[in-house]
Amino acid sequence: MLKAIINAKIIFEDKIAEDLVVIYDDNISQIITKDELVSYDNIETIDIDGAYLSAGFIDIHIHGSGGADTMDATFDALHIISNTILSTGTTSFLATTMTMSKDKIIGALENISSNKNRVTGAKIIGVHMEGPYINPAMCGAQDINYIQSPSFEIIDEYHDIIKMITLSPEVEGGYAFIKELEEKYPHIILSIGHSNANYEEATKSFDAGISHATHLGNAMSGFHHRNPGVLGATLNSNITCDVIADLIHTHKTTLELFWKIKRDKLILITDSMRAGCMKCGEYSLGGQKVIVENGKAVLENGKLAGSVLKLNEALKNMTKNTDMDLIDVVKSVTVIPAKKLGLNAGRIEVGLSADMVIFDESFDILMTIIDGKIKYTKGKQCSDG
Ligand SMILES: [Zn+2]
């Protein structure tokens, strides 16, 4: 049966409409005025009482949530992540791997390849490989012992599911690797990250095929006025980038600056590890012990180890701390990542999958809908399919 969402403030790319009704089954089938709804019978209406309705959020960098991690390499882990993040408004994501042994990475990729379409929550749209082709000097929470030289060995086998690779261009053989990757697999987004390149090296890598920067500011050479680093090169270029807007990885003034400079090239991510949506305590990330306390995840040596940020909180943090408005923040997790990934998604538009999220003024997620099915309702455990 067709469904209609009424009394919504619908967030489009260029406006927020209060007088329209979204009609959908698996896909969005019509967008009509309230008056036109009377001509429909046999339609289920969902009155959302003035809440916001937008396209579902897309997280292009998430390792885990709900106690599970992509590197666990089990169906259960993916299933838990996929269902846990529904409460953050996320309807699709790139399952993100870490720098671990070749066998572990292959295990995780094999698992995603076989099970990505079996999860019942947020959709797995592919893999983001974070490492292992990175610079040991900027390993961050990636295990330095497993950093590898650029190689096609894993990529050739799993190129159909890999959508993004975070790598460092300045390592030996880095540029040739990027050029070859770009030619062989143009659908894979190459992102500079965990990189100690200087400004010139980073800029050269953008010409070679790097088109994105991973968690801008974190695990990369920073900005110095005489040595502007990867950060300066990214800001002074047209490449897209993403940021962990948890106010721990990035200062609020930095967020403001990033927004002022990057505008529609800026994507919000969580970089969440398995403790996302969980209580404080001890967890692990990429085989290393992580302590989670006060919204912060750190290794035993004190280094930040991924985040426990929820994507809806990232939106809230940006609207509070920058002059991004509601349309801007929603675009940064819908239209912009969808375009980057080449997906025909991320918009409330006739013909697209009915992947939608309903939230209130505080960005509290009230309902998450995937392919037209209600998968999450605030305060309820159950779903309709
Ligand atoms: Zn990460």
Image (spheres, helix red, strand yellow):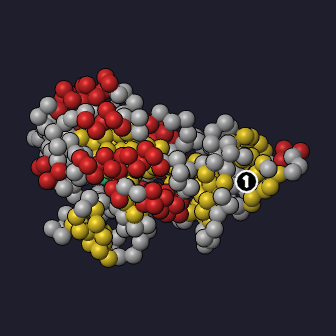
Frontmost residue, 140 versus 69:
69
Provide residue 178's location: percent of width, then percent of height. Answer: 24, 30
Frontmost residue, 202 versus 352:
352
Q: Which residue lies furthest to the top in this view?
A: 183
Q: For mark 1, give the secondary structure.
A: strand
Residue 204 visible in this rendered orientation of the protein: no
Provide residue 162's location: percent of width, then percent of height. Answer: 37, 39
Q: Residue at x 31, y 40 (%)?
A: 165
The three-letter code of the residue at mark 1 reads: Ile
Question: Residue 5 vs residue 358: left or right?
Answer: right
From the image, tell me which residue sits under label 1: 5
Provide residue 84's location: percent of width, then percent of height. Answer: 49, 63
Q: Is residue 110 above or below residue 48?
A: above
Q: Residue at x 78, y 44 (%)?
A: 33
Provide residue 90's location: percent of width, then percent of height. Answer: 51, 54
Frontmost residue, 81 versus 259:
81
Residue 375 visible in this rendered orientation of the protein: yes
